[in-house]
Image (spheres, coloured by chain):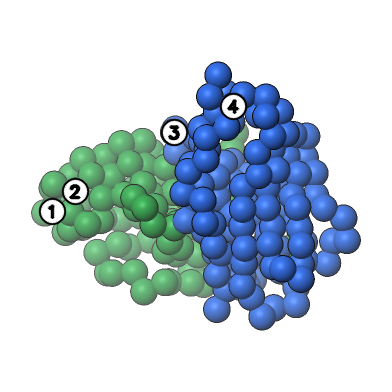
Chain colours: A blue, B green
Amino acid sequence: AQKITQTQPGMFVQEKEAVTLDCTYDTSDQSYGLFWYKQPSSGEMIFLIYQGSYDEQNATEGRYSLNFQKARKSANLVISASQLGDSAMYFCAMRSVIIQGAQKLVFGQGTRLTINP
Amino acid sequence: ETGVTQTPRHLVMGMTNKKSLKCEQHLGHNAMYWYKQSAKKPLELMFVYSLEERVENNSVPSRFSPECPNSSHLFLHLHTLQPEDSALYLCASSPRKGLTSTDTQYFGPGTRLTVL
């Protein structure tokens, strides 16, 4: 069974610093996808970045990048030049299976990131 | 209106009440999902619909009853809930795609449910 582990319940970072949020995963599948979501206090899950298991390059989206180390089964999210608006819960997720075109996602416990001014 | 919307945003109900949560997506997707998010627990997938057909039911108690009348709308009917059912209920949608798709799920803002 697929599993996502996020070992940092909370992180505190100074504004403008870079921050790395850890994510490790466990799967026996050869093909899989990894996602990061941001959840502000409003509750909505906002998609940030995606990494496919066969992608040779690390994914990047603006200030977000994914440090994908396949052999170590890790997919850490790096946020550069953090901003106050980055304060939120962050979830790592893995697409575990496709059922009739619909996808099942397995989520980690999340990391609460707080950016200090 | 764009994206995924959910109503109501907040709901307080007694254990004997019957209520329904509504989700609507304006993205042209044809797979929809219900998740439960309890405090200090990972998101739990409850139901999955693909082209209005339920394709996954993750051992959810029968007091939760989903309905998908068309690809744009998803309901969660609630009856005789328990206090431990209090949680944030999130709806999501995605396009129907294959295993290597980069498409992800798009979430609504959730309904914060409190069962007294």
Q: Is residue B95 left or right of residue B90?
A: right
CA–CA distance in space, label 1 to label 2: 6 Å
Disc 2, SS: strand
Q: Say if labels 1 and 2 share a chain.
A: yes
* Numbered disc in front, either 4 or 3: 4
Residue pointed to by mark 2: B115
Q: Quadrant of residue B79?
A: bottom left
Disc 1, SS: loop
* Numbered disc in front, either 2 or 3: 3
Q: Report the front residue among B31 and A44.
A: A44
Disc 3, SS: loop
Q: Earlier in the sequence, mark 4 or mark 3?
A: 4
Res A41 label = 3
Q: Chain of mark 1?
A: B
Residue furthest top in the image? A117
* Numbered disc in front, either 4 or 2: 4
Give the residue at x 51% y 51%.
A8
Q: Chain of mark 2?
A: B
Of the residues shown, which amino acid type is indicated by label 1? Met
CA–CA distance in space, label 1 to label 4: 45 Å
Q: Report the front residue among B59 and B67.
A: B59
Asked whether the beta carbons under mark 1 and mark 2 sit within 8 Å of each other, the answer is: yes
Q: Residue B48: x, y in percent? A: 50, 64
Q: Is residue B110 left or right of residue A108?
A: left
Give the residue at x 77% y 40%.
A61
Of the residues shown, which amino acid type is indicated by label 2? Val
Of the residues shown, which amino acid type is indicated by label 4? Gln
Q: Report the front residue among A27 and B97.
A: A27
Res A14 label = 4
Residue pointed to by mark 1: B15
Asked whether the beta carbons under mark 1 and mark 4 sit within 8 Å of each other, the answer is: no
Q: Earlier in the sequence, mark 1 or mark 2?
A: 1
